[in-house]
């Protein structure tokens, strides 16, 4: 009786111990956002170290510009909320000012799209055709420029 | 006057032919009890629990059982890791798209500022 219980407990300990040991060893680690994403791209697309270094440099170069654009987009959304608030409370807005706002927002949106497409194009240029096709398939159609889109 | 043959006679004849076992009294005692135990087991077959206990009392079975449990645990961990990896890949793909698109980055900021307490 004691022997049966002892063997059962040993089996349980072996199973649970092995399970959590392997889980701990193979569980994806949390690293910084850009590092994790680029590491995933490298693994998924099987990039060579040279390709990875180039693509990493491209992303690092453009990240400041993309962050600045994201800041502008956030500012435009705040301004839009202010217009909407004014329309609801006062009942009217300055249409000239609103037209300027719409034009500026359109320019910023276009610049955002172009910046993203430039980044995608520059990254895709570093890749071979198979890697490029796989990379572009991961992105929404709007992010692929006409140049980068495979036929 | 003819007498009927005694049925014990052939048995007694056979006993005389069989050599006496060359066992010490202790070994003979052990052998007798072993045969009695075997006979009892034959009369009363083991219950399921008895069979389990009997199997677990064998070191080879116990070792195989522990090894099988460990392997099963490792197999489940492998399944779990591959599931987590697949989930993480989807999250990374979405995060990458957000990273390279300022419009989506701004969405994230809006969500983050809406969630954070007002300062």
Image (cartoon, coloured by chain):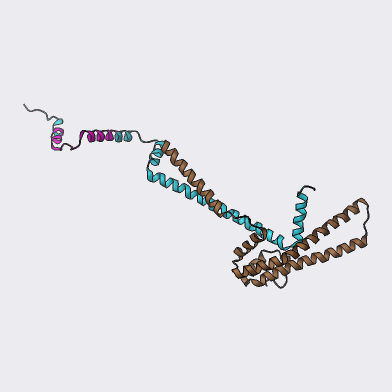
Chain colours: A brown, B cyan
Quarter where residue A148 is shown: bottom right
| Residue A5 visible in the snapshot | yes
Residue A76 falls within the magenta-colored stretch? no
- How far across and down, in percent of the image, does residue A141 sit? 71, 65
Residue located at (9% from left, 27% from top): B3
- Quarter of the image for the C terminus of chain A: give it: bottom right
**Residue A15 against residue A148 in the figure, above or below:** above
Residue located at (83% from left, 63% from top): A105
Predominant SS along the magenta part = helix
Left/right placement of residue B43 relative to residue A32 reads left
Which residue is more in the foreground, A147 or B45?
A147
- How far across and down, in percent of the image, does residue A144 sit? 71, 68
Please identify the residue farthest to the left as the structure is shown.
B1
Residue located at (86% from left, 63% from top): A102
- How far across and down, in percent of the image, does residue B76 sit? 53, 50
What is the total number of numbered labels drawn onto the structure image? 0
Q: Which residues are magenta?
A: B11-36
Residue located at (15% from left, 36% from top): B14
- Quarter of the image for the N terminus of chain A: give it: top left
- How far across and down, in percent of the image, does residue B105 sit? 74, 59
| Residue A144 visible in the snapshot | no
**Residue B45 against residue A105 in the figure, above or below:** above
Quarter where residue B42 is shown: top left
């Amino acid at each position: 009786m004691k022997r049966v219980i002892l063997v059962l407990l040993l089996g349980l300990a072996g199973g649970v111990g092995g399970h959590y040991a392997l889980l701990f060893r193979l569980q994806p680690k949390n690293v910084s956002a850009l590092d994790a994403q680029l590491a995933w791209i490298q693994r998924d697309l099987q990039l060579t170290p040279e390709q990875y270094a180039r693509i990493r440099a491209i992303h690092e170069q453009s990240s400041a510009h993309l962050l600045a654009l994201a800041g502008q987009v956030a500012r435009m959304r705040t301004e839009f909320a202010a217009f909407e608030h004014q329309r609801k409370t006062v009942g009217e807005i300055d249409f000239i000012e609103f037209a300027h706002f719409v034009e500026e927002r359109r320019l910023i949106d276009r610049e955002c799209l172009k910046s993203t497409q430039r980044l995608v194009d520059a990254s895709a240029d570093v890749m071979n055709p198979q890697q490029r096709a796989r990379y572009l398939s991961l992105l929404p159609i709007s992010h692929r420029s006409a140049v980068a889109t495979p036929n | 006057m003819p007498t009927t043959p005694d049925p014990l006679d052939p048995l007694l004849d056979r006993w005389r032919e069989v050599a006496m076992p060359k066992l010490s009294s202790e070994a003979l005692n052990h052998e007798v009890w072993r045969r009695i135990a075997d006979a009892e087991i034959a009369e009363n077959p083991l219950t399921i629990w008895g069979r389990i206990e009997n199997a677990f009392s064998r070191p080879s079975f116990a070792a195989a059982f522990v090894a099988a449990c460990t392997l099963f645990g490792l197999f489940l961990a492998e399944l779990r890791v591959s599931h987590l990896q697949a989930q993480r890949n989807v999250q990374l793909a979405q995060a990458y798209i957000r990273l390279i698109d300022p419009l989506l980055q701004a969405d994230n900021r809006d969500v983050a500022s809406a969630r954070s307490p007002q300062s």
